[in-house]
Amino acid sequence: MAAFEKIKRNAAAHGEELAREKPVIMVGAATCGRAAGALEVLQTFREEVEKRKVDCQVMEVGCMGHCYAEPLVIISKPGYPPICYGYVNAVIAERLVKEFILGDNTCPEFVLAALEPNELLPSFSDFPRSQYEQKIILKNCGHIDPEDVNQYINADGYAGLAKALQMSPEEVTEEVVKSGLRGRGGAGFPTGQKWRLCRDEPGKTRYIICNADEGDPGAFMDRSILESDPHAVIEGMIIGGYAIGARYGYIYVRAEYPLAVKRMETALKQAKKLNLLGNHILGNGYSFDIRLFHGSGAFVCGEETALIASLEGRMGMPRHRPPYPSSRGLFNKPTVVNNVKTLAFIPHIIRNGVEWFRSIGTKESPGTAVFALAGKIVNTGLVEVPMGTTLRQIIFDVGSGIPNGRQFKAVQIGGPSGGCLPESALDVPVDYDSLHKAGAMMGSGGMVVLDEDDCMVEIARYFLEFTQRESCGKCTFCRLGTKQMLEILGEFTFGQGSLEDIDRLEQLAEEVQAGSLCRLGQTAPNPILTTLRYFRNEYEAHIELGKCPALMCQHLIAYYILPDKCERSCDACIGTCTVEAISPNKKRIKVIDQDKCVKCGTCVTACPPQYNAIVKLSPPSEVPSK
């Protein structure tokens, strides 16, 4: 296509200017990096380069995935492999310019990895987890400037669109059908089938919507893609719109993602300027436009019919299906709703072909899965692995296991409505069907790791509290059922209730699951059902013994000061107790008044580690008499 070839040539010329023999400094400045101080690091690099008059490019990039080591910086210097530095601050940035950019000292003490093999850094190689990862939709994240469309084009961006426009809409749809791509928003419905159903509906007006209303606690995959590689989502939407015959698309993004909103707005303007979006795209005759819609942060709007209601200016509440959005969606017209990750896969599938995509992952779940690792895990951040990778590989090989020598206990996968899987399930392969059999679900990609200090009763209560609070209240099962379950769990965390209440809770969870209108209510009981399935003994301990085995439930623990370890001259715990529950006895040994103590744990943190005199126990304890 002549129009696209011209765009590619211009982008290539831009790339050649950037690729001149000079160092390039890339600073990860997505939300995670900014929270850790990346903007200060970025400014320091720019000031140092200008002050020292160095011919060097300083570039702002997106999330590299290694969020545990933010701020992250990659330096590419002629004669050296690209080197990734972690935990960079302004002082380190200044030193890197002085000693590496202007000299030959790579400052190995700050190096996380050399991204290519090189004899100059024999002790450093790529991240060990790289052998388990296969980056497709995260490939550009952290390696291109998300606000420079030319860099995206030079990374094969919009080549999928150019190829799709040379095919018929039916051919594009069938390619996606044959690829076996399943929706990455959680339900895993075949994407191509959804497109085909919408395209086959009568009438001329159709819509495609990108669901970027990511509201799961501990999930940040969609946000990172929007911030780091926005054009990939736009390209996927245009291809999807072409396939189903839509003239308009909407990106529904939560307003709590200001950086994602800003970068999407910039990317949309750039795409229009290059005629990659708008009227007669690339001279093909197909016209398509995208509008950005700011959601208000309601978790239930992640459900497609609630999202559509919100787009139409109504209260975000789900409706009965059928009819499905593919036949009656936005403004009562046929509509496709796809997740950010689903759309980001589309350009790769069209450009590289069905066989390439199906060679990755499993037969029923081809491709890769993107997860946000959070909780009790060494390497928090984003990972992309082939479908079929086991939970054990993701947690221990990619995430480097549990910190502080603690023992793995469970992993909560699939968001707040996902399931909690124990150690015995670590060899379950990550795909839609295997996780469903284990009692969990793929969800949108959140993965929260729990260790021995986590109480599974409290974890179930915590996640249910979130879904109960986010319920729109439309259907009785969800509105009242989740409230009743939450009350029962609350009693358990106080050591109250009976064993019959456990059976009652399980029955209620199954009824809410079966009777709720939308996926929020249908999946809200999952944390309860899986913790009852795998950790029923903890529920029984709370009720029969009045104890929390993990010492997490505040009403079932107490703090004590060990008299043989308490240092008489130290008053650190006294000074930090906000309720004045700690006082010294006649021998200057500190004592905690259990009636005043609010069990905040501040005293434990305040106690100097060389003494380690304060312990958390289940009362009544066997602490020696004061």
Image: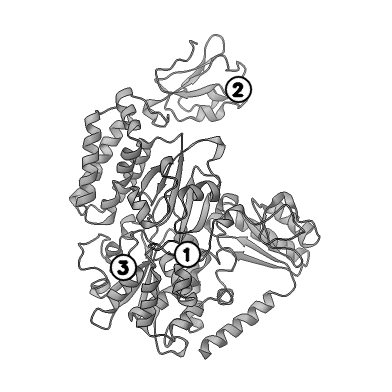
Does dot 3 land on a helix, a strand or a loop?
Answer: helix
Can residue 113 be spotted in the picture?
yes
The relative height of residue 247 versus residue 308 in the rendered view (above or below) is: below
Identify residue for label 3. 311
Front of the two marks 1 and 3: 1
Amino acid bearing label 2: Tyr
In this rendered view, identify the residue nearer to me: 265 or 17.
Answer: 17
Lower position in the chain sequence, tag 2 or tag 3: 3
Front disc: 2 or 3 = 2
| Residue bearing mark 1 | 360
Instruction: Using the image as rendered, state which of residue 252 and residue 584 is in the foreground.
Output: 252
In the picture, the disc for residue 476 is: none
Which amino acid type is shown beneath numbered disc 1? Ile
Q: Which residue in the protein does label 2 denote?
A: 611
Q: Position of residue 37 (x, y in %)?
A: 60, 53
**Rendering coords of residue 277 (x, y %):** 45, 81
